[in-house]
Image (cartoon, rainbow, N blue to C red):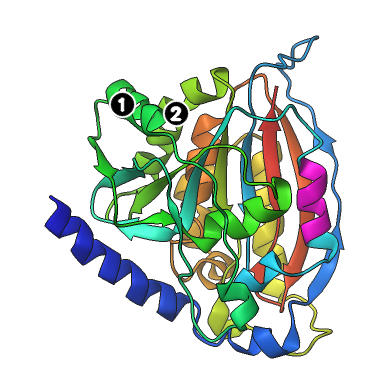
Amino acid sequence: MMRLVKFDMKLTARRTFLSLLGLSGLAALGVIMNRGEFMTTVPSAARKNQKNSSLAPALFIGHGSPMNALEINSYTQSLQQIAHSFQTPKSIFCISAHWMTRGTWVTHMAQPKTIHDFYGFPNELFSVQYPAAGSPKMAEQIQNNIQQPQIHFDDQEWGLDHGTWAVLKHIYPQANIPVVQMSIDMSQPMSYHFDIGQKLQFLRQQGVMILGSGNIVHNLRQINWDTNAQPHSWAVEFDQWVKEKLVARDFKAIQNEALQTAAGKLSVPTLDHWIPLMYVLGAALNNDELHFDFEGFQNASMSMRSLSFRS
């Protein structure tokens, strides 16, 4: 089985390099935010009168370029604010766009390594370490609680890639909370990922924050290098469509209809950054409040929309 994982890690690396095609220019130009702003709360119709402070949130964070790990801008400042929006979780469970495998895997090591799964960036970025502990116990609990599909353990191949640490570096910079990362089986339909998200709801009840890291709009071939670039009209259209479906709690439409329009196809040319949202939607509860923690675009073709479900 580990032979298959090693094959998939090579596949992951190649896909990561392709997905970051053209982003080396960000190292020189910096990451430019466009229309970035803090957002508000959308109450659930089934909202409880009292908050359950022991229930950890489920977040989807648009992570964009790895350079965000070093930047101070309205987007990264919003991540710092998120940390003050709820109680500090006991552990963190992350689904990143950058770990693509056959089958579904979770990191099982006690000390996951920091993976720099990109190239062409400043040495300062490669020097970043996020030395959070892992949680073999949580990984084992997930495997025991989810019988279908089978959850495999990764004890040495992967770790924490930049989809995880570039975000957590701003939310919990001390890296003092254990982190487990789950891979994405790219061969499976949206319903597969949504269903796993539903099966992960029990983690929230144990104080484990569920984090999906990707982007609602992520088209690197349509990047505009103009530092003052406005987002493409199709990117704004699709980002707004997803927002409306989220507010309406129409998760089925997000799973089944997102790629049926020209705007959707341009916004999601590959599924890697889209799929983490499915896990977060699956982990959402009926009595959660939906918070839009940030809205904005980078370089015209990446939506940095970040949202959370909290009870």
The quadrant in which the C terminus is found is: top right
The three-letter amino acid code for the residue at tag 2 is Leu
Residues 46 and 123: in front is 123
Residue 65 in sight = no
Q: Name the side, left or right, on which 208 lies relative to 34.
A: left
Secondary structure that dominates the magenta span = helix
Q: Residues within 10 Å of mark 1 (few under 14, many from 20)?
A: few
Which label sits on residue 214? none
Q: Are marks 1 and 2 in contact (CB under 8 Å)?
A: yes
Q: CA distance from mark 1 to mark 2?
A: 8 Å
Which label sits on residue 146? 1
Q: Quadrant of residue 73?
A: bottom right
Label 2 sits on residue: 200
Q: Which residues are magenta?
A: 76-82
The three-letter amino acid code for the residue at tag 1 is Ile
Q: Position of residue 169 (x, y in %)?
A: 66, 54
* SS at mark 1 in the image: loop
User: Does label 1 or label 2 sit earlier along the sequence?
Assistant: 1
Q: Residues within 10 Å of mark 2 (few under 14, many from 20)?
A: many
